[in-house]
Amino acid sequence: MRVHVLVEPQRLILTWRAPPHVKDRLRWAVGELRRDGGGVTFRYLAREEFGAANEGRSFDDLLRAGFLGYPAFKWIPGHSAIYDRGVLETFLRRLPPPSRVDFDRFIERFYIEPGTRLSPLTLLGVTGAQLPSDGFAFVDPLDSRVQQQDLILEVAGARYQPDALAGVQPGARVQLHAEPWNTYDSSAVRVEVMGRKVGYVSRFQSATISRWLIDRHIECSVARRNGTPDEPRLLLLLHVRARAAALYGWA
């Protein structure tokens, strides 16, 4: 069970989730990391795009959840200043450096072959750069134009499906079903294991995955199940291929 085909993202979404004592457990989209020429920039979402990315919620809702911005980059609600100095260096501090002797063991946790060379954006996108202490994580929104890619995807809403999660083991085959009639998200993609719904594809990735379901071949299996009883995590391994490549068995 390995990730072999990696694609460097051109943009990543910085997300944030409030501490466990906060009732609203939404994962908020708060900023964007973007490849810009030879460098990388960061900005917080502007007011209009913030609402569209967060189910119609407002900056006031985000403030009530306790958000104060990312410590290294000042946040003023409604403003979208572009930061272009020290951006990668700042966010890469959330991860062990490739020079560490145990770095290969770290990337193996994400099913990447030891010795694989990863660009900074790829590393942030594949790992999410998630720490247990602050609620921040990166999400790769994916690019629907990509012909082939392997990726690890975290199921959204798994905590609402405890009965369906019971007995789910790594390696189990996963079915992905588009729900264009979904009243909350017309790009919603339902995740099933053994015919039972275990959650959905993240709303940050569902538009691309739903498109891939139409014109790509996707093989999907359970990579790992962990977390806590109250906050279970279910990770999937996806192999996305062009339909012709899948037909002829090309990797």
Image (cartoon, helix red, strand yellow):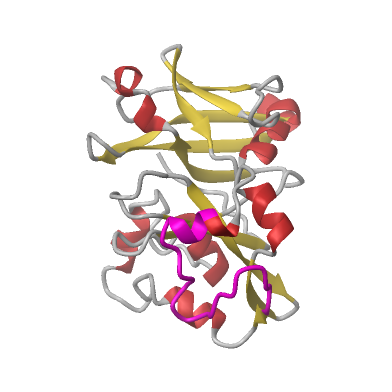
Residue at x-position 45% and y-position 70%: 68
Q: Which quadrant of the view contains residue 161?
A: top left
- Asked if residue 140 is positioned above or below residue 69 in the image, the reply reads above
**Residue 9 visible somewhere in the drawing:** yes
Point out the residue furthest to the top here.
195
Q: Which quadrant of the view contains residue 148?
A: top right
- Asked if residue 51 is positioned above or below residue 84 in the image, the reply reads above
Q: Is residue 74 magenta?
A: yes
Q: Is residue 93 left or right of residue 247?
A: left
Q: Position of residue 117 (x, y in %)?
A: 49, 67
Q: Position of residue 74 (x, y in %)?
A: 53, 80
Give the magenta part as a residue range. Answer: 61-81
| Figure label count | 0
Which one is nearer the viewer's eye here, 234 or 217? 234
Residue at x-position 65% and y-position 64%: 45
Which one is nearer the viewer's eye here, 211 or 131? 131
Q: Position of residue 34 (x, y in %)?
A: 67, 68
Q: Quadrant of the C terminus?
A: top right
Q: Is residue 1 left or right of residue 133?
A: right
- Asked if residue 99 is positioned above or below residue 28 in the image, the reply reads below
Q: Is residue 1 magenta?
A: no
What predominant SS class does the magenta segment belong to?
Answer: loop
Point out the residue furthest to the bottom here.
85
Which one is nearer the viewer's eye here, 54 or 35? 54
Residue at x-position 27% and y-position 20%: 166
**Residue 142 visible somewhere in the drawing:** no
